Amino acid sequence: VARRPIIAIDGPAGSGKSTTAAAVARALGYTHFDSGAVYRAVALVALGSLGPPETWAGAAVAGAAGRAPVAVHAGGGRFVVLVGGAPPGDALRSDAVTQEVSRVAAMAEVRDFVNGLLRSAAVDGGVVMDGRDIGTVVFPDAEVKVFLVADPEERARRRLRERGRTSDSDAIAMEAGALQARDRRDSTRAVAPLVQATGAVLIDTTALAFEEQVRQVIALARAATFGVP
Ligand code: CDP
C-alpha cells in the first residue's frame, strides 16, 4: 500500500516554517512534525549530561541522546518529542539550547540518529514536516517541497513578538544578528546544509499575511496530490 503524501517545508530560522506547517497539517488532516524540536531535544540532553559544548564529539552526543532517550511520538494528528518519556516543554526554546543546537545539528552521528526517528515516524505519510533538510535529505521524494524565506529584520520581529519581548530597533538588530549567525552555521556545514531542494517552491513571506502563506502551501499540496484522499 502506497504511503500518504509528505509535505516538506524547509527554510532559515524564523521564516514561519513551524506555524505554517502546523496550520497546513490541521487543514489537511495530516500530522505536523517539527524536526527542529528533535535537534533541540538532543542539544538539551547534551547540555545536561556532557561537559563544555566545545568538547562535545558527535558520537558522544548521539550516544547521550539515545540513552536519554530522545524519542518522537505521533498520535491523533499531534507530534511530541519526548526526553526520558516526558515532553521537555519550554526548555526546548531556552536561550542555552538555541545557542548550542546548530553545533549538535552539524554532527553526522546526530543527524543519523534524528533521521532514523523522523523516517520511522513518517513511514505512512500524511505528514507535514518542517526543518532544514527535509526536502533534500530526509524525504527527497516528498510530494510537495517548499522553501520559506523572509528578510532577517522581519524574522527577528516575528521571533520577538512570539516570545512576548519588546521589539525596539536595538532588540531587532540583535535578534536578526543571532538568527543570521545560526543560518550561517546551518548553511555552511558539511552534512545536510540548509539549501533549497531541487523541485522546491520558494515562498518569500516577508510581506505575506500568515493566512496567505498557508493558503499557498495548501494549494501546492492539492495540486500535487490531486486524486489522493
Ligand atoms: O524554530 P527555529 O527556526 O528557531 O529553529 P528550529 O526549526 O527549532 O531548528 C533549530 C536548529 O536545529 C536549526 O538551527 C538547525 O541547526 C537544526 N535543524 C537541522 O539541522 N535540521 C533540521 N531538519 C531541523 C533543524
Image (spheres, helix red, strand yellow):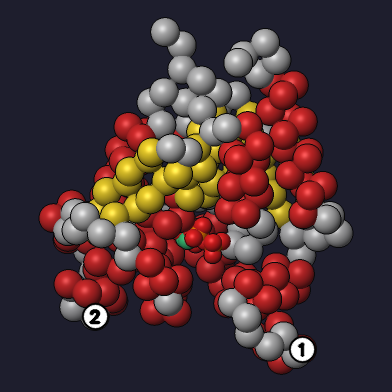
Q: Residue furthest right?
A: 207
Horizontal side of 6 relative to 58 (left or right) equals right
Location of residue 37 by image quarter:
bottom left
| Quadrant location of the C terminus in the rendered image | top right
| Quadrant location of the N terminus in the rendered image | top left
The mark lying in front, picked from 1 and 2, is 1
Secondary element type, mark 2: loop
User: Circle 2: is it few (<14), some (14-19), or many (20+) Cα within 10 Å?
Assistant: few
Vertical position of residue 52 compared to residue 5: above or below: below
Can you tell which mark lies on residue 52?
2
Location of residue 199 by image quarter:
top right
Toward the viewer: 66 or 3?
A: 3
Q: Residue at x 82, y 47 (%)?
A: 212
Secondary element type, mark 1: helix
Horizontal side of 176 relative to 192 (left or right) equals right
Could you tell me residue 133's position as x and y percent? 50, 44
The disc, 1 or 2, on the residue closer to the chain's N-terminal end is 2
Location of residue 146 by image quarter:
top right
Vertical position of residue 210 compared to residue 55: above or below: above
**Residue type, mark 1 in image:** Ser
Horizontal side of 14 relative to 52 (left or right) equals right
Q: Is mark 1 within 8 Å of ligand 1?
A: no
Can you tell which mark lies on residue 169?
1
Q: Residue at x 18, y 73 (%)?
A: 50
